[in-house]
Image (cartoon, grey):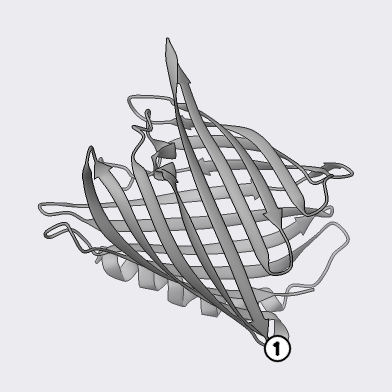
Amino acid sequence: MNFYRIFLIYICTSLLFTKAAMCNDRAFSKLTGIESSYKLTLLSDRVDFGPWHDGGIGFYSLLKGTPLIFSAAYQYRLYPKSHVNDMQLILDIWPELHRFLYANINAGWSPSISVETIYPDFHLHAELYFTGFRMTELSLGTKVSFYETMTPVLITGSYHFITEKESITARLFCIPYHGGSDASIALQYRHTFTTAGFSVGAGIGGGTSSEATERATLHDLWSYHCKLESRIKLKNGWKFTLLPVLYYEEYSKDKYWKKFELELKVLKSWN
């Protein structure tokens, strides 16, 4: 039953496209796009693990000229002797504060479908972005996650260099605690080839595991990945993205697994 919920979220998006397209532009607010996604995760080196399923739907809009995104995400993970499923509702606001300066305010809530939740019960994330340097973006932010037994505070920072064809991203994660802190860093390079509405991006990355941003400690676990992103732009604002990613990760001290992710996104946008 849980597996079919993900596909229900994914399929229902196509029905919402028709209704959303009839939404008229207004001076106060307007709907600018809608996106649905599905991701399959396979763990080849762990017996009886997986597959893991992720489904999501997001609505893009403008509120007095400020971008606003409302999204819902659902995960269903199979383990050797159990399964875990969880849902999260997220609100993203992207206000422009000044020339070259904007922010992202992100709030998420999880209805806790199962006792072993994947997402925190609630989280708040605020990040400041500066784009005053040519082809460069810098950011600094903080995130507070509220779990049943802990409330970790995460400090984030990033450096992003981007051109029409290339991008380099470095992102730092730090969790301070009494008497010290845990830090993690993620690095990524990407090159894009584009022709006639079709683009392919090839990327590689590595660093200590940034997936631990939802944990109380980072543990300095290593993670490496390579990916190939294919994107097709069609008429009338339709866009399809297929993203396979292969990971080689340290899931426990000196123990590694291979993880494969395949993600499909469908986006419909209006001017």
Residue extending furthest toward the top: 179
> Is residue 129 placed above or below 224 in the rendered structure?
above
Residue 26, image x, y percentages: 85, 65
Residue 51, image x, y percentages: 24, 64
**Residue 92 visible in the shown view:** yes
> Which quarter shows the C terminus?
bottom right
What's the residue at 66%, 81% (across, down)?
194
Whether residue 115 sits left or right of residue 80 in the image: it is: right
Residue nearer the viewer, 180 or 36: 180
**Residue 114 visible in the shown view:** no
Whether residue 189 sits left or right of residue 104 in the image: it is: left
Residue type highlighted by circle 1: Lys
Q: Quadrant of residue 218?
A: top left
What's the residue at 84%, 52% (across, down)?
64
Q: Which residue is mark 1?
A: 235
Residue nearer the viewer, 112 or 106: 106
Decide: few, some or many residues near mark 1? Use Cα within 10 Å; few <14, some 14-19, many ≥20. Answer: few
Residue nearer the viewer, 171 or 94: 171
Residue 267, image x, y percentages: 60, 74
Whether residue 165 sits left or right of residue 130 in the image: it is: left
Residue 213, image x, y percentages: 44, 38
What's the residue at 47%, 74% (across, down)?
12
